[in-house]
Image (cartoon, rainbow, N blue to C red):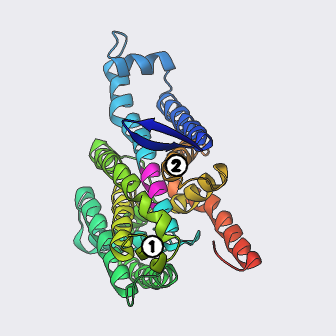
Amino acid sequence: MTVLRLAGRSVRFDRRASLVTAGALLVALAATVAALTVGDYPMPLADVLGVLTGGAGATRRSAYVILDLRLPRALGAVAVGAAFGLSGAIVQRVVRNPLASPDVIGINAGAGAVAVFLVVVVGAGPAAVASGALAGALATAVTIYLLSRRHGVTGYRLVLVGIGIAAMLTSVTAYVLNTANVYTAEQAAVWLSGSLAGRGWGHVVPVLVAVAVLLPVALRLAASLRTLELGDDLALALGTRAEPARAGLLATAVALAAVATAAAGPIAFVALAAPQLARRLVRGRGLALVTSAAVGAALLSCADLAARRLLAPAELPVGVLTTVLGAPLLIWLLARANRIGRTG
């Protein structure tokens, strides 16, 4: 750990965490570049650069493919992955449980239940579904928090309440799907699987804005994480009011997860896996919030590229691929928690 003096203030600089973050961002950049060049209409990198820079060699067709189809999806994978990674890191550190993440404790289930209702019952369009998913995620988070805050919110109680709420909402979603006709049920199932296919700038820009705004907020609140991990009594003795600090951090995490879910659907396991990978890569040094966001961006960028090309010309929803890869990680975490007798 290196301490730098900037403008009269001490800034902690962890070289290993910085290298891991830079490496994850380079992986995300490489996946983004590859996503712009490969597809049913392959394009050389020189042509892609010509389109992006407004070069004379760019054609109307190539500009449409890059700027309207591939670039929003590629940047969406980076932004959604970063939002999920950062959200998962905050939740895991606040509740002090590596098994906690927005998709495990019910945030994604709330978004999915409202989205399915809007698709099946109301027949809403994509914009209304995204807005409803955002509202459903936020409402679910508030409900979980209120049900968990008796005598102060504890991580153990929050996770249990979240899992119960998730199970209930999943049952509601299943019931609505079973009562729908085949066509609308298929539409809802596609959204529930989590996919970046067909995402345009209207989906991507809100996530980019949310990450740009909420990442500094999370870093500002990160000092509270260090004291909250010592316990509420000691945190209060050190001048940190545990309940407002925890509420602010959870609100930041929920907002990130809600915006990401509204844009791409409930993509599973990115919020769970990214903080765990980041924590192990930096060897537990620092809070790894920025590193978790970078690892999340790299994970989803690579997963979306693989989902596009593994079965080409057919395409997998990226949420299916992340579930297949993430389930073994969850099993390993559960086995490890059972072996060492705790979840931390």
**Where residue 174 sits in the image (x, y, percent)?**
43, 79
Residue beneath label 1, please? 235
Labels 2 and 1: the sequence-earlier one = 1
Quarter of the image where one finds residue 261: bottom left
Type of amino acid under label 1:
Ala
- Relative to 241, does residue 207 appear above or below in the rendering? above
Q: Residue lying farthest top?
A: 56
Q: Which residues make up the magenta segment?
A: 80-87
For this orientation, the residue located farthest to the bottom is: 150
> 226 or 216, which is in the foreground?
226
Residue type beneath disc 2 = Leu
Residue sitting at x 32%, y 34%: 68
Is 279 in front, or is 309? Answer: 279
Label 1: element kind: helix
Quarter of the N terminus within the rendering: top right
Query: For residue 86: magenta?
Result: yes
Whether the magenta-drawn stretch holds residue 215 is answered as no
Q: Which mark is residue 300?
A: 2
Q: Secondary structure at mark 2?
A: helix
Residue neighbourhood size for the residue with mark 1, other residues' Cα within 10 Å, grouped as few (<14), some (14–19), many (≥20) = some
Quarter where residue 178 is shown: bottom left
The image quarter in which residue 108 lies: bottom left
- 282 is higher (above) or lower (below) than 39: below
Mark yes or no: residue 317 visible. no
Q: Which is closer to the viewer, label 2 or label 1?
A: 1
Is 237 placed left or right of 119 in the picture?
right
Q: CA distance from mark 2 to mark 1?
A: 35 Å
Task: Count residues near mark 2 (Cα–Cα under 10 Å), then give few for <14, some for 14-19, many for 20+.
Answer: many
Main SS category, magenta section: helix
Q: Position of residue 77 (x, y in %)?
A: 45, 45
Give how far across and how far down residue 315 sits, in percent.
52, 48
Q: Residue at image x 43%, y 58%?
A: 222
